[in-house]
Image (spheres, grey):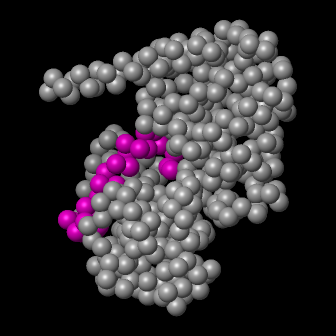
Amino acid sequence: MKRFFCGKLLIILLLVGLVACGNNEGSGTAGEDTKSAAGGEQITLWVPFSGPDGPKMQEIVNAFNDSQDEFSVNYQVVPQSEYYTTIDLTLNDNRNVPDLMVMHGNQILTYVENDLLKNLDDITGETVNLEDYNENAVEGAMVDGELYGIPLDIHPLMFYWNKDLFEAAGLDPDVPPTNREEFVEFAQKLTDGNGQYGYVVPTLWPQQFIMPTIVYQNGGKLFDEGQVLYDSEEVVEALEFQRSLITEYGVSPSDVQQDGEVTLFLQGKNAMHMNGPWMLQQWEDSGMNFGVAPVPMLGTKQQAVFGNSHNFVVPEVVGEEKHEAIKQFLSFTAENGMAWAESGQAPASKAVYESAEFQEMKQQPEVAKQFDYTQFSPRVRNWGQLSDPLMEAVNEVLLGQKEPREALEEATNRAQQRLN
């Protein structure tokens, strides 16, 4: 117990230290009139891009800083695992608050309802034109019709496949399945009974993207008008289908642990895989011959895919003297965001995703094809915590520990209690 306490204390001290010194080169306390070394107004930008995407955002910041001498951006990366904890500590303490932050779309509502984010309708002005962004992305950054984020990207679930395994199974390596019937047929042909599977069903992450995708494709909802709907027919059917891939069709093993499906995909033992666009670098580094496409229509009613987004947000306490620098940087990023596309993501700026250069990329145009029908998380506070019972039920069912309806009814009750 003493060792556990000391470990937790060390983590807290490290986070507090990061918050305390994070802006030594930035804007200091929000509202302070801080100048950069070059003499221009400086703003501090916090991002959670601690992976290979971080340097790509750094390229955009460097290009902006080099493009003029009136403003500059101090770019600071906070590790993803500590990002929101660090934000909470900073905003609660109201010291060394960054002037601009990147925030996931599913987090915006909670921070808005806690009065921690600035309404951007009044400060974007004509410099940041919302018509320059994908409409669905803009809508996802709104709360009750008011704008609280400027979209950087949309990152929906994607479909990947091993082209070599397709060809060996007599399938066209350039033609992925587009619906449930084709998906099951392909998965069966790609399963050889000797350790190679057509589609390894994840029991944990990224079910947070897969399960809602099939539910939305079934025409269902997970939450509506204050009610948790995990036990609705559309949700039950989505989970029954996933389980059938294990129990009925036999195209997946039954005891997949965290990231087991990724490992098997990299080893050439899992022919089809669903994950986010952030996986591109790993696939390319492996040297595998893979394809990428929008997610097949695995549901029964409509085309849909679950996704999240990155958005630029402004803490409520940031003063007006920072607004012009913020606007100029956001405008610059909208026009000069190709570096972000090079990270594997698809920027929500039309100037980027409609460009000829973008369309020539391998994965990114496939991501953008799903922009208009991407569904985001329900508009409810603390969605992550509210969805935990659902993910626990998915895990139990896919591991054969409970029946779908029973597990989902229990998950509904637990989530509704958390909501109340």
Asked if residue 32 can be seen in this view, the reply is yes
Apparent side of residue 275 relative to residue 349 in the rendered image (left or right): left
- Of all residues, the one furthest to the bottom in this rendering is 170
Question: Residue 118's spot in the image, x, y percent?
Answer: 63, 26
User: Foreground: 394 or 251?
Assistant: 251
Which residue is at a point 58% across and 16% down the rendered structure image?
23
Apparent side of residue 388 relative to residue 332 in the rendered image (left or right): left
Residue 97: quadrant of the picture:
top right
User: Quadrant where the C terminus lies?
Assistant: top left
Question: Residue 219's spot in the image, x, y percent?
Answer: 51, 67
- Of all residues, the one furthest to the top in this rendering is 33
Which residue is at a point 54% across and 58% down the rendered structure image?
285
Question: Residue 309's spot in the image, x, y percent?
Answer: 59, 47
Asked if residue 372 can be seen in this view, the reply is no
Which residue is at a point 78% across and 31% down the rendered structure image?
64
Question: Residue 408's spot in the image, x, y percent?
Answer: 30, 61
Within the magenta stretch, is there residue 325?
A: no
Residue 236: quadrant of the picture:
bottom left
User: Foreground: 359 or 152?
Assistant: 359
Apparent side of residue 376 relative to residue 331 in the rendered image (left or right): left
Which residue is at a point 63% across and 39% down the rendered structure image?
55
User: Quadrant where the N terminus lies?
Assistant: top left
Dominant secondary structure, magenta: helix
Give the magenta range: 377-405
User: Foreground: 325 or 258?
Assistant: 258
403, above or below 371, in the image: below
